[in-house]
Image (cartoon, grey):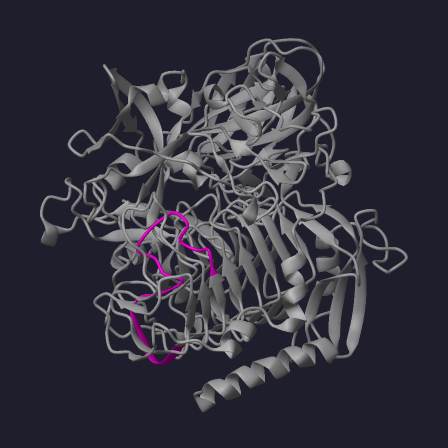
Amino acid sequence: MDTRILSLAFGCTLAFAGAAAAATQATFYVSPSGNDAAAGTKDAPFKTITQAQKAVRAINGSMTGDIEVILREGTYVLPATIAFDERDGGKDGHYVRYKAADGEKPLITGGMGITGWTIHDEANNIWKAEGVEGRFRQLYVNNRKAVRACFPNVIAANEKGNGGFDHDFVRLTKVDSSGRAFDVSADYIKNIKNIEDVEIHLMIAWSENILRLEKAQVNGGTAKLIPKDPERTKLFHRAFPMLGTAFMSNPPKQQVFYLENSYDLIDAPGEWYLDEKNHVLYYKPRSGESMATAHVVAPRLNTLFSVLGKDTKNKVGYMSFEGLTFAHSNYTRPSEEGFLDLQAANFNVDVLPDQSRGNWEKLNSNKYLLWRPDAAFRVENAHHFLVQGNVFSQIAATGLDFVSGTNDDMIQGNAFFEIGAAGIMLGKFYQDSTTEIHIAYNPSDKDEISTRDTVKNNLVTNVTNEHQGAVGIGAGYPRYVVIEHNEVSYTYYSGISIGFGWTKQQTAMTNNHVNWNEIHHIARLLCDSGPIYTLSNQGTGSEIQHNYIHDNGTSKWADYWNVPIYLDEGSSGFTVKENVFKNSPAGVGQNQAGQNTLQQSNNYYSDDVVNNAGIEKAFRYIRDIKEIPLADFNGAMEQTPYKAQLTLPGIVQLEDYDMGGQSVSYSDKDFVNEGGAYREDGVDIVQVDSADASKGYAIGYTQAGEWLEYSVNVVTASKFVFRASVADGLEGGGIRLFIDGKAVTDTIAVPQTDDWNTYTLMDGETSEIEKGEHILRLQFTGAYVNIDWIQFALTKDELGTTGIRAYSMDFMPNADRSLKVFNASGRLMGVFNNRAGLSLTETLKQAGLAKGIYLVRGAGKTLRVQVK
């Protein structure tokens, strides 16, 4: 072993051992039955984790020992993502520790309970729940995952766990590359009435691709399935993975798929369908399930915990999370834009023209922009973190993601099962979502690289269930990473993957160790995978040693073969030796790899490896964790007015939307308050400054489909006229108003203004609204609308003309500053320097950013800038 690595690993172990043994400065208690007005003691605990977070912030400026937050048993129903930043960490080696009480199992859920079931179709035993808000792609009934209605029906796979299942498949008739469509047997869709709601899940070599369908054209026995854009255009521009007749198949065979998401596909127990237009959820119970007593959970929040340091020089440090259960995260991008997996569930944001390959309209481009799925627990810019003894289950996408800027962290002794994508992801896979992915990642800011992180003694099983092209443990471009003594099993693609980019150029990677892992039952669907898979130049000193690899093969549905240990394009710097194979392809496969030291015999056997690879004895108890506690939603935050019930006629200040949280009182497509003002949930609120220097707030950074709700008391039944204060620097913005779920206006186009600094007035009229208490919903039908307030009146003469605000955005140009720039979807484009006297628009243009809308963060504020 490299002596430097030994000293680093030993130092890391000492640091965490010290954290466990350190003196305690303060202890706070939290319980679902507590009270946030209490003292936070064992006998008088807080009710919410966020209240404990505030208590920690009040005392961690100076630390003489660890600060503990003890979570008592019960369900913590999160109304919004809990966001930790550099204000929340420890100092000087002292930790802030969020941990379960001894012997107790606190459950942190991003889900919501679904109740009120009634019979819908007695003959077919299909039940329904009405008034179901939100969008979700998973459902859990009595702690078992239900099946989103599909064709063909799924196949039981109890070896994955209680209620486990695999998808079954049929084959395309052919790919119509000219028509950018798929030909299939007309029998497959003959009973489907709502084809525009259906998705095709298409397996292409090593990737899984989800495309929403626009329409189907039936001609005799063949149906032509035409996908929606943008995923249709992207897919038919891509050269890889290879769409069409399966690569090297003899005789030639077409690729496999299943269809999903239609009421007409509910024909087997355990299947469900959400009618989003009418807010009705349908379910066909399994044997023994009674919908009068069934415990049904749907996910709401994409991310439960987010840890985000300000930048790589201001990281969050010295925190631990121990003994907690994380469940019911959401991930809905496939329902909104499709999901085209390029590799390891890194999906296409765009496909670029590739002049070197000719006509890119014909499946010819090998230039891509990518991004990664959301995670239930997300960490970025953090050091000396301990994530230990936790359970991640019933997760829509990734379980735990150390995105970038992480160092000297330990992920140990956690159980990951029933996960939609990867169990664990670590480090960047590319610079950002605007950098072509074959450009070797090797940033000048080395603090951005995930460094000296350890992933050890984790159980990662029954994962990649929603995104079959994901991996068990996936690392992008880390350095000095240790992935050892994990057990990885039941994946549809590779087990452990390290590296990205397909390049022999120098990268950020060096001295990465993948040793003493047990890997079995992987690659159960896709091809071109390995139990351990690598890409690109890994520097020097990297190792793949003493892994026990068994019971792996190739699925009958795979396009072609799988490989044992797989050193794919550009892989170099590894010493591979003394790995044991049993009932599995053996040896080392190389494809355009660089220089490696291979000391691996195909028939090598060692009792030491067989007996000691995988989870070490002290952590083997996690193998016995088969399920999570049932969520109790009785203590969930209900929808209530933020300050007081609003009155119509009257003015609705739109930042005062109801309490309740994501999918209850609002729906926002990311978990960050981009404006950073007024409230601490995921709704984007900006500060506005009026001419009289008074401060106010407005809703900003909006995206189509987002909404906000307000409890209102309508004093008199009437049609209402209304006036709104709005700003929109682009065309296409729009809003619509609803009362108790019923539209009371048509879609109203928001007038374009010079920019988002300048507000104007917009008038409209509602249909008749009954007297009494109601829920008013403001829905955004077009993006990038800023809206401050809406005044409702009985006559136009009663509408005011004052209160138009000018948004103060002049916070940067007079000084040199470092700016973080994000695209409109919130993805980091890069960090750029703004020179004094240079406008932000010019700064972004000089940085080479394309036309579009960007979010710029600097000086503690966030600004939206348009590059024309």
Q: Residue furthest toward the right? A: 43
What residue do we see at 31% from left, 30% from top?
A: 228
Q: How many marks can you see?
A: 0
Q: Where does residue 164 sit, x and y in percent of width and height? A: 55, 42
Q: Give above or below for 531 relative to 786.
A: below
Closer to us: 836 or 637:
637
Q: Where does residue 576 sit, x and y in percent of width and height? A: 36, 77
What residue do we see at 31% from left, 58% from top?
A: 843
Q: What is the span of residues highlighted in magenta in the rendered image? A: 520-543
Q: Give above or below for 538 relative to 361.
A: below
What residue do we see at 83% from left, 47% from top?
A: 33
Residue 234 in sight in this render: yes
Closer to us: 571 or 165:
165
Q: Where does residue 144 sit, x and y in percent of width and height? A: 62, 39
Q: Is residue 435 magenta?
A: no
Closer to us: 564 or 551:
551
Q: Is residue 530 magenta?
A: yes
Q: Give above or below for 752 relative to 429.
A: above
- Which quadrant holds residue 732? top left
